[in-house]
Image (cartoon, rainbow, N blue to C red):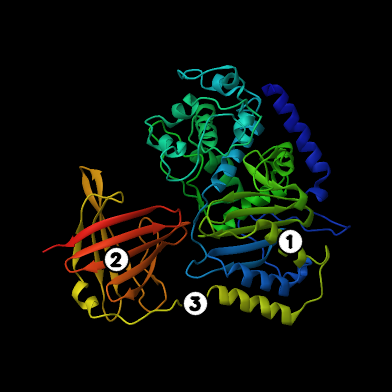
Amino acid sequence: MRLRMVAIAALVAGFQCLAGYNAAIGATDGQDLQEVWPTKSWPVSTPEEQGMDSASLARLIETVGTYKQDSLMIIRHGRIVAEAYYAPYVPGISHDLRSVTKSVVGTLTAIQLQKGGLDSVDHPVIDLFSDKEIQNVDDRKTAMTVQSLLDMTSGIEWVERFYTPDETLMRMFKSPDRTAFVLNQPMAGAPGAKFNYNGGNPYLLSALINRKSGQNAFDFAKKELFEPLGIKSAKWGAVDAQGVTIGEAGLFLSPHDMARIGYLYLRNGMWERKQIIPSSWVERSKEGKIAATNGFHYANLWWSLPDKGAYMARGRHSQLILIIPKQDIVAVMTGVLRDNEFYSISGLIDDISKAVKSDKPLPADPIASTLLTNATRQAATEKPTAVAGAPELAKTVSGKAYQFTDNELRVKSFTLNFLDSDSSWVITTYTGKAERPTDRFTGLVGLDGFYRKSPPALYGINAAKGRWINERTFAMERRILGRGEIQTWTLSFDGDKVTVNFENTDGFKAELHGEMSE
């Protein structure tokens, strides 16, 4: 599509949107819904005022709370009807979105189309990187388009299994030029023929933003997406050596701001009567023409369940922006679930849908409202884990620094302080930088089954708790609130020596061997 055609299409779309605006903002069955744009803040409503049942939402909050979730928020007709934060996570903390980042990169690509910076999603990829000496070029790579990147059907040979020797994504991150690394991969099949989840595809799209806008994806997003939507919580990882923002993960947003992304799609790409992304882009994302995995469909870096009438942005460890257009609903969920733990998205859609009773307001229900209030309050109340008393060894190891041999975690030393109050831990690590050879991390640790939160640090808020498993083994569970990860440090003491077994929610494991320093 030529620039002129893009401009004409945008103009026509603008007139169409204004002409049919009441339908676009979610009026149903003759109900005249007030226009809602949550740029400054989200309006709050009782579920009954929006045709939903408080008791059903209370049960949903309780059910979600049985998993390692951080938050759940449900919005109908542009108003928050249910919002829960599960301790120790609290409101206002930006959350690691993992692969929800991909859907945002897709949205930025849509903005490039809307503004005419990208002429067409059918543009061949290697033409857009013509200055690169691309390897393994054949007819299949020549046919690879922007759309095939967006649909995870690029045909690039790619293995994405975490912490395995042939894992392509990790090799990409070790490459001095990650964009070139992706472009140089051989082809496994014809573009468009087969779905293959590939973190290199959104990396190329992020690099394309640099080329077309002269800005990295984060700077482009701040101006063209986050500022118009009122998003202020955004954090994104550092750019690579070529100035490219990581496209496959790394974005942090608060749940409220995650919901703004979903609401943009629910309103067909419009915000405050301005078309931010093409409505046709939203329709394709919703339709999900590409058959993916486990019954899901895919398109434009968004997942969908067409038979459920819903589409979504999904990230590892239970990050979710869910859109149910027919019910005018956006739902957001964040968490720290392991890969073998998951909350059924299909079940979540069903549970939300069952709570919808009408497109018109329901009578107030004080009893159900109380149930919802109590469920929300209980979610924010931490439940302690079982602990045992401290052995005599605790006095011996308290305050002692244990030095470690070379290890994958680059840990130099580990110290535990067991006091009557404010017990704490200290970890020092090697940085590999001459100007600052070590880093020091410290925080409080609860010994009573509850997390202890530490004062905010540059990297976030630590929350940790620990317990003695037996006379010589202490296990500490550490979180940085808002990160989709739980770390477990299990220290087994043997005289002056210690063995530390580390494991995190990503499934990464390491064994460290240390000795008490003099």
Residue under numbered circle 1 = 350
Q: Give the CA separation, mark 2 to mark 3.
A: 24 Å
Q: Position of residue 472 (x, y in %)?
A: 27, 73
Quarter of the picture containing the N terminus is top right
Q: Work out whether residue 53 can be spotted.
A: yes
> Given this view, does label 2 or label 1 mark the residue nearer the observer?
2
User: Left or right of 487: which side holds 142?
Assistant: right
Residue under numbered circle 3 = 383
Residue under numbered circle 2 = 491
Residue kind at label 2, given as amino acid type: Leu
Q: Position of residue 173 (x, y in %)?
A: 41, 37
Q: Secondary structure beneath disc 2?
A: strand
Q: Classify 10 Å Cα crowding around label 3: few (below 14), some (14-19), many (20 and above).
A: few
In depth, the one of 239 and 344 nearer the eye is 344
333 over 238 or under it: above or below: below
Residue kind at label 1, given as amino acid type: Asp
What residue is rendered at 29% in x and 61% in y?
500
Q: Position of residue 344 (x, y in %)?
A: 64, 59
